[in-house]
Image (cartoon, grey):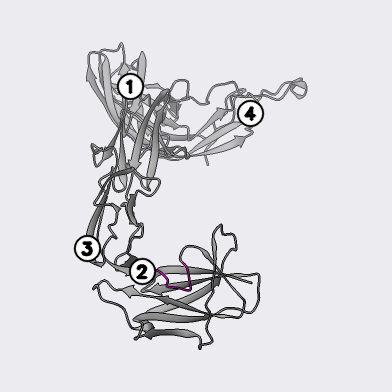
Amino acid sequence: MQAPQVTQRRPIEPRETIAYPRSGDQRVHGVVITSATSTDINDVDPAYSTPTVDTSANEPELTSPQAVFPTAIQAVNATATTDGPVDDVVLMPGQFIPDPSGNGKGTQRLFTALGGTVYTSASTDFDAPDITGVTSSVGTGSGAVTVTTDANDVSGGVVLYRDNTSDAWHHAQLAGTGGTLTAALPVAGGATAINDLIVQLVDEAGNVGISTDKGVGYHATVHTTSVGLSTQPERPSSGWYTGPVSVVVTADGPVSVSVDGGPAQLYSGPVTVSGDGTHTVVATAGTITKQLTVNIDTTPPIISGLADGQTLVSGSDVTITCSDPQPGSGLADCTNGGAVDTSSVGTFTRTVTATDNAGNRTSQTLHYSVVAFAGFYAPVNDGVMNTVHAGRTVPIKFNVTTAANSPLTDPSQLQVSTFTISCDASASAVVETTTTAAAGLRWDSSGQQFIDNFKTPSQSGRCIGVSIVYRSATLATAAFRLT
């Protein structure tokens, strides 16, 4: 194990020294780091190197200045040995990054692997090229760095960097002429910043100039200047989509996207918007905010008022209506809807088409029949409350004309239902004729009519309704007050 790096009043850090014995006039001039693997340990309270003096016990505890130590992780030293002069490549696989609060603690970075190139030459020039400027930028999926120098013998260089999506280090080659070198810096798609960018320039003698922004590493943050929103498929002329929509964001930097006021997520690909109604997509990048409204209606209109196969009573009021379920685009058209003609008996067909503003369409061909009910015959009166003594049997007489315009004679096709009704009625009539015949519905061939001998309940003070039903259609209802 090699001795650590001990620098007065600085954190003690690990150090590795690799000796390069000289061969002829070849000398080690510099080292370029091209690969690295590191781990950052937070909240570390480091050990410091302090001078041994009589008053040291009374000195306050040392704290690290607000600078990374050491600023560079490689150096070259010349050492005289009994076997002759040796060039030492010194690697510093540890760096302490102080906490900005100045509490003495910070982050300890430990490099577990370093790779690079050692440059040797016979040149007597040992002056490393100065780095006079470093500018960097990052966009979606890529970044760039520009390095300037006042040296006229720079042959190239390497930048070592990390983006803010992981701890992985990457490197890129610098190239250029006239004192300006550039490099493209590939980054992950979701990267919003380049961290810890270290610049290394090499001159013709092999000397390496290093710039680390005082050990912090140059940083570049994405600055989005343009944001656009579009949809796939394109917005229809109606303004309403009839299925899920993909919202595409185009920008020159990272963008956060939220849908319908939900949490913002970093945009990484088309955002799917679904569900009927009006949706709001908001893209935000810094001070830039773009908003897109997406209207979706996938539900076709509803046709109601008449069912296929329904039986209607002549003279009844029946209306076919169309509606658009909410939230929806609204009804645009209801072709062949409206009132149904029930003035004559028969079998009919009607095709109704409903269309909403989004273009959804419902079409139904409705088959229906109209039958006639001429009303109740005496002693029962239509449209009024018939008064009868409780317990009496009332003959309810009537006729039904079928859709084929022929009289109905089969009692099995009819249903008679009784139920309690409200006694609130403005008009009434007294049933003067009752019968002692057995209760039940029958066809009276001699009178050419149906007769239902209705046995009223024995409890007075009630009101009863009696309905005649044919093929689920209520033909009429007779009302009785029991006294």
- At a point 23% along the width and 73% down the height, the residue shown is 404
Amino acid on which the number 4 mark rests in the picture: Tyr
- Discs 3, 4 touching: Cβ within 8 Å: no
322 w.r.t. 211: above or below: below
- At a point 67% along the width and 23% down the height, the residue shown is 51
Amino acid on which the number 3 mark rests in the picture: Thr
Amino acid on which the number 1 mark rests in the picture: Asn
Q: Of all residues shown, which one is farthest toward the front? A: 432
Q: Is residue 377 magenta?
A: yes
Residue 175 in percent (x, y) is at: 24, 24
- Quote the CA–CA distance across marks 2 and 4: 112 Å
Residue to which mark 3 is pinned: 349
Residue to which mark 4 is pinned: 48
- Discs 2, 4 touching: Cβ within 8 Å: no
- Quote the CA–CA distance across marks 2 and 3: 24 Å
- Quote the CA–CA distance across marks 3 and 1: 97 Å
Q: Quadrant of residue 456?
A: bottom right
The one nearer the camera, 209 or 393, is 393
- At a point 24% along the width and 55% down the height, the residue shown is 352
Sequence-wise first label, 4 or 1: 4
- Discs 2, 3 touching: Cβ within 8 Å: no
Sequence-wise first label, 3 or 1: 1
Residue to which mark 1 is pinned: 207
| Label 4 Cα crowd, 10 Å radius (few <14 / some 14-19 / many 20+) | some
Residue to which mark 2 is pinned: 374
Q: Of all residues shown, which one is farthest toward the bottom? A: 438
Secondary structure predominantly adopted by residues drawn in magenta: loop
- Discs 2, 1 touching: Cβ within 8 Å: no
Sequence-wise first label, 2 or 1: 1
Sequence-wise first label, 2 or 4: 4
Amino acid on which the number 2 mark rests in the picture: Ala
